[in-house]
Image (spheres, rainbow, N blue to C red):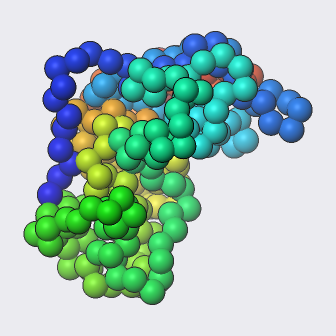
């Protein structure tokens, strides 16, 4: 079971910032952001540690709201969303965190299926098996999270992020703790998802990963510099 692609026939912007800013603790962390992510686009986000990459991703899935300017998700202003609207919107956005957390007492298959459980939905065993097979974890369905390697945990996190069939996948330093071979394996999965029509945004400090991806797809590279998000130059 791979994520189903929405086919509404209606053009929309997945995520749109207009002169947005985010302040924290009395200081502005991000400022004057104007950026639109179109359906099916692939973006990398770079910048030094502490520059605001994780904060930007949290804005993208409405965990945070801008303190100035506007942000729309699927053409709806986040400030107009009720708590239930936010929950429904987040079902269309899959997130892979850098430090992926699992319930250690549950087997891998149950951990991956948790978003469905929370939403009151079920998945056919064959669909879940297909998804685990797609990320290369088909033989580990009954394994407990503590027994998994770093690469296996990240691929499990990706499977969990896409099990609801989201339109957008956000990944925060998904290869930060992986070796090069496993980083490339995860990149291959993200590229395949993009080719299926998913919008992908990957925050990473690994410029070699970006260089590896460039021949495979038309990715835009964004850089956070001096609290602003800019298109990176060709030197990447």
Residue drawn at x 14%, y 57% is: 1
Relative depth, front residue between 129 and 164: 164
Residue drawn at x 28%, y 28% is: 40
Relative depth, front residue between 120 and 65: 120
Is residue 152 positioned above or below 97 on the image? below
Q: Is residue 103 visible?
A: yes
Is residue 113 positioned above or below 15 on the image? below
Residue drawn at x 20%, y 73% is: 138
Which x, y percent locates residue 90? 44, 44
Is residue 191 positioned above or below 9 on the image? below
Which x, y percent locates residue 50? 73, 41
Which x, y percent locates residue 180? 41, 56
Q: Residue furthest right?
A: 26
Relative depth, front residue between 136 and 163: 163
Which x, y percent locates residue 72? 50, 23
**Which of the 4 image quadrants contains residue 70?**
top right
């Amino acid at each position: 079971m791979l994520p189903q692609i929405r086919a509404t026939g209606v053009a929309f912007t997945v995520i749109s910032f207009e002169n947005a800013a985010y302040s924290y603790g009395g200081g502005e962390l991000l400022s004057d952001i104007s950026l639109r992510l179109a359906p099916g686009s692939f973006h990398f986000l770079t910048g030094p540690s502490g520059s605001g990459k994780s904060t930007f991703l949290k804005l993208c899935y409405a965990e945070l709201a801008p303190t100035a300017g506007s942000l729309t998700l699927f053409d709806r202003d986040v400030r107009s969303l009720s708590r239930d609207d936010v929950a429904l919107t987040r079902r269309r956005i899959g997130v892979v965190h850098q430090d992926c957390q699992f319930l250690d007492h549950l087997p891998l298959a149950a951990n991956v299926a948790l978003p469905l459980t929370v939403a009151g939905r079920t998945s056919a065993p064959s669909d879940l098996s297909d998804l685990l097979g797609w990320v290369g974890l088909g033989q580990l369905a009954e394994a407990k999270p503590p027994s998994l390697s770093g690469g296996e945990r990240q691929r499990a996190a990706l499977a969990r992020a896409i099990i609801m069939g989201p339109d957008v996948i956000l990944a925060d330093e998904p290869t930060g703790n992986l070796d090069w071979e496993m980083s490339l394996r995860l990149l291959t999965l993200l590229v395949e998802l993009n080719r299926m029509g998913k919008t992908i945004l990957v925050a990473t400090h690994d410029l070699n990963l970006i260089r590896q991806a460039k021949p495979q797809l038309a990715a835009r590279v964004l850089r956070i510099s001096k609290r602003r998000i800019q298109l990176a130059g060709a030197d990447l």
